[in-house]
Amino acid sequence: MSELAPPAQELSGVRAVVTGGASGIGRAVARALRERGAAVASLDLRPLAAPEDGIAEVVCDVGDDTSVRAAVARSAELLGGLDVVVSNAGIGSTGGVEDVDDDEWHRVLDVNVVGAARLVRAALPHLRASAAEALAAGRPSPAAVVCTGSIGGWSGLVQRAAYNASKGALHALVLAMAADLVREGVRVNAVAPGTADTPWVRRLMAQADDPDAALAALVARQPTGRLVSAEQVAHAVCYLASPLAGATTGSVLQVDGGSHSLVLPPRQPPQTDQTDQTDQTDQTDQTDQPDRETR
C-alpha cells in the first residue's frame, strides 16, 4: 500500500495553540496542524526542551488561571494572534463512585472541564478579533475551538467514574460554548477518541500483571481490531479546525473505530473444524457488547 499523500495547506496563515502538546495526541495534533500550514504553539506543563521547527513551546498549567492567561498571551505574542484553540490537556482517573474521594473528583473535574473553560476564556478576545477581521473582509472566519473529549463521555466505562463524568461534562460544555459563540463567528467542536495508542494507555497497561496480555485483550475488543492512533485523532482535529469545516459547530466527532456505535459479537479464535465453527457461531449472543476502554 502506497503512503498517503501529504496534507493540503488548508490551514496556511492560521495561528493555533494546543494544550497538552508535548506528547501523545497533543503532539500529534501540533504536528498535523503545522503540516497543514498553521503556525503552532504547544502549551504543556513540561514543554519539550528541544523545540521542533514550526512549533513554539510554552509552559502552561491548565489548572491555574494565571498560568493559562500568561501562556495564551505569550502564544498570541509569538504567533501574532490566535485563530484556533485546541483544548487537549487532560488527566485520567480510575475507580468506581465509592472509590473516588472528594479531592480526586475536584482534581479531575478541575483539569478536564474547568481547564478547558479557562483556556477558551483566556483566548476568546483573540478568537473574536480573528473572526471580526475575517468577516469584515468578507472571508470565512477561521476562529475555532476543538476540545478532546472521549468515548467515556457517552459510554459507561468500568471503574472510570470521575473520568467519565468529566468527559460527559466537557461534551456538554462544548455544546454550550458553541451556542454562545456561533453568531460571533467562533465555531466550537470536540473529538471523542476511543482507545488511542498513547503513552498514557501504555502506562495503564504496564500496571497489569501481564502487560502484553492486557494490551492484546484491549486490542481484541476494538471493532477494527486495532487501537486508534494519535495521528488519526489529529486528522479529525484538523478537519474541525479548518475553515473548510465552516458549517460544522456544536459537534462531537467519534474517532473510536466504531466502539461507541457498533455492537459486534466477540472475536472467535481460528477453527479447523468447520462444523465446530458453525456451532460456536450459532451460540454467540449477538447482543453482547464488548468492553470498552478509553485513551
Image (cartoon, rainbow, N blue to C red):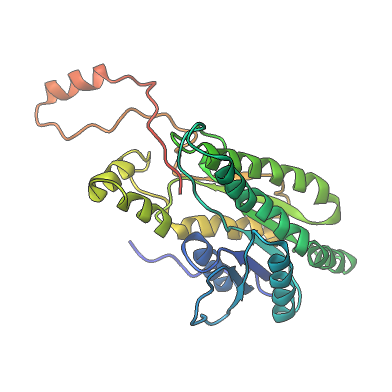
In the displayed structure, would residue 156 be above or below residue 211? above
Residue 3: x %, y % from top left: 38, 66
Residue 253: x %, y % from top left: 59, 45
**Residue 200 position by quadrant:** bottom left
Residue 126: x %, y % from top left: 80, 67
Screen quadrant of the N terminus: bottom left
Residue at x 70%, y 46% (from the top left corner): 174
Does the image show residue 243? yes
**Residue 159 position by quadrant:** top left
In the displayed structure, would residue 205 be above or below residue 73? above
Residue 172: x %, y % from top left: 68, 40
- Asked whether, in this view, residue 142 is left or right of residue 282, the answer is right
- Asked whether, in this view, residue 140 is left or right of residue 276, the answer is right
Residue at x 46%, y 58% (from the top left corner): 230
Residue in the foreground of this view, choosing between 9 and 59: 59
Does the image show residue 14? no
Q: Residue furthest right?
A: 136
Residue in the foreground of this view, choosing between 258 and 212: 212
- Asked whether, in this view, residue 43 is left or right of residue 287, the answer is right
Q: How many numbered marks are there?
A: 0
Residue in the foreground of this view, choosing between 229 and 23: 23
- Asked whether, in this view, residue 263 is left or right of residue 70, the answer is left
